[in-house]
Image (cartoon, rainbow, N blue to C red):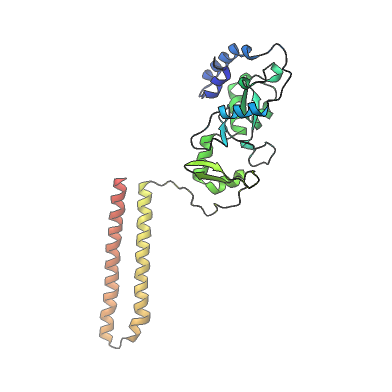
Amino acid sequence: MTHPMKRYENEDPKNKKKYDKLIDDIDFEVKKYKLSELDKSRIINNKDKEIVWNNSKSHSNFDKALFRIDILGNIGIKNICYNNNFYNKYFAIEYEHFISYNHYGKTSKSNTCILNAGVNRSKGDKPLYEYNFEEYNGLKYYHGVSAEDLLKELKDDLHNTCKKYNLHFKKKHDVWTLLKNPNGKYKEYTNEYLNFPVNIKVNSKTEMVIATVAIVSTFNCLNNGVEYTYKNYLKPKLTDEKETTILDKIITTGTSIVMTGLSVLAVVAAVSKSSKD
């Protein structure tokens, strides 16, 4: 039989009515996972923890050896302690009873899940299935970070995301992972991505404007260079006044015509690319 809290894990409650029905279903079955008296052991052993970790949901964009999704949908990182430091506590996970120990929940793999450490410490002994919709969302978003939100942060601004959490994220084989020190601890971030280009989304029209301005500016610089060279190096060597006047007109008119023509070509090329996109 599917554990009742597994439904909780897979559910995406978009409204309170849907959530409340889910909780009613859990309440109906939860008594089957309780004992008549407290377990002698409250601590989950390391072997069972490893099994619970491996059975927890992974995400295709993150290294499954280091990242897993907790029961509320927040992403957790293996071996990060809640009190390790302020920056990465959002990824700390703890092993929690589905049905709490004080509510006679079994200390077993089937009654254990990974849970964001901040959520676990805030809720105390109260089981997750006893929270209402507003409390559920409050716990989820206040203490943790979803995989989708973290992906967006990494894509939009890698430097500031690494700095925010003081972790060195790196993409390997299209999957996000974390760099480690020789001692096995996660490497702290030291501004390696400071000058890394930020992903800025632009549409075709914006690209067209940027490309046109860049090309016209380049041609303008070339034009100014030609005029400067002529006035400062070539013109002083000319002795015939009539010859000088003719060359002045040729330089002025010729560079203007060339620049106008190239600018028109740049605009046409940019418009053509925009229409194809």
Q: Residue at x 28, y 67 (%)?
A: 258
Position of residue 150 measured from the top left corner of the image (x, y, whole percent):
54, 39
Q: How many marks?
A: 0
Question: In the image, is 255 to the left or to the right of 121?
Answer: left
Q: Is residue 148 above or below residue 196?
A: above
Any part of residue 256 in sight: yes
Q: Residue furthest right?
A: 40
Where, quadrant-wise, is the N terminus in this rendering?
top right
Q: Residue at x 36, y 66 (%)?
A: 220
Position of residue 204 measured from the top left corner of the image (x, y, whole percent):
35, 47
Answer with the quarter of the image where residue 161 lies. top right
Position of residue 63 measured from the top left corner of the image (x, y, whole percent):
53, 38
Q: Residue furthest bottom?
A: 239
Q: Nearer the viewer, residue 256 or 105?
A: 105
Question: In the image, is 163 to the left or to the right of 273?
Answer: right
Where, quadrant-wise, is the C terminus in this rendering?
top left
Answer with the quarter of the image where residue 227 lies. bottom left
Position of residue 247 measured from the top left corner of the image (x, y, whole percent):
27, 79
Q: Residue at x 28, y 86 (%)?
A: 241
Answer with the quarter of the image where residue 84 lies. top right
Any part of residue 138 in sight: no
